[in-house]
Amino acid sequence: MSSPQSSTCLFEHNRDPSIIFDIPTRYVEFAEKIGLDLKDTYGILLPNSRFWIEVSLVFILVLILGMVVSVIVYYTVLQRTTTTKQQQRSHTTNTTTANLITFGAIVPFCFLFPYAFISVTNIQNVAQRFILCCPIVVYAFRSVEGKVERET
């Protein structure tokens, strides 16, 4: 997804500016009098399209992961309802299965996946890490919420 070169491109400006403008010398002299370090020439960089493509791909990956977690939680935890006496007897088995799936598989996966993915892809940009980690933590909490809701 993200190479070291593109993930640090917000800090290393080795691109050519698209618009260059000069500041009049009287403003530079005034800034020096009051103690500011002002340069004569400034440039404006256009947004890096590769960065936004990488952010979009990470976001799409997180959404797909959220759909997979939601389907697993729905079919293994939420959909198991007890209606008949035979199903009421197997309620403890269903609860054990739901506990194992929720706390043994989904929650550890949700908390460990971002670290593994970041180390494999070498994502160094804070915005990309944030987009990756926040929804996955929410998925873990939502699966625990579904488990607790099911018990009540």
Image (cartoon, rainbow, N blue to C red):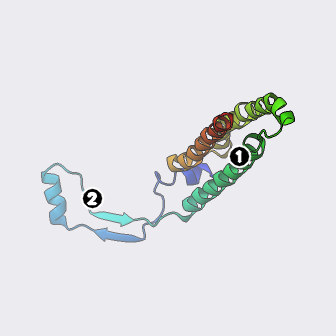
Q: Residue furthest front?
A: 85
**Count of numbered circles in the view:** 2
Q: Secondary structure at mark 2?
A: loop
Name the amino acid, label 2: Lys
Residue occupying image coordinates x 13% and y 51%: 34
Residue occupying image coordinates x 75% and y 45%: 79
Q: CA distance from mark 2 to mark 1?
A: 52 Å
Q: Are marks 2 and 1 in contact (CB under 8 Å)?
A: no
Residue occupying image coordinates x 20% and y 51%: 36
Q: Secondary structure at mark 1?
A: helix
The vertical placement of 40 against 130, above or below, is below
The foreground one among 30 and 85 is: 85
Which callout, 2 or 1, points to the residue nearer the camera?
1
Name the amino acid, label 1: Val
- The image position of residue 44, as x and y in percent, is 38, 66
Residue occupying image coordinates x 48% and y 58%: 14
The vertical placement of 146 against 91, above or below, is below
Q: Is disc 2 surrounded by few (<14), some (14 to 19) or many (20+) residues within 10 Å?
A: few
- The image position of residue 21, as x and y in percent, is 31, 70
Question: Does residue 1 appear anywhere in the picture?
Answer: no
* Residue corresponding to mark 2: 39
Which disc, if any, is residue 127? none
* Residue corresponding to mark 1: 69
- The image position of residue 152, as x and y in percent, is 65, 34
The foreground one among 130 and 142 is: 142
The foreground one among 99 and 39 is: 99
Q: Is disc 1 surrounded by few (<14), some (14 to 19) or many (20+) residues within 10 Å?
A: many
Say whether residue 25 is left or right of residue 2. left
Going from N to C along the chain, the mark reached first, 2 or 1, is 2
- The quarter holding residue 140 reads top right
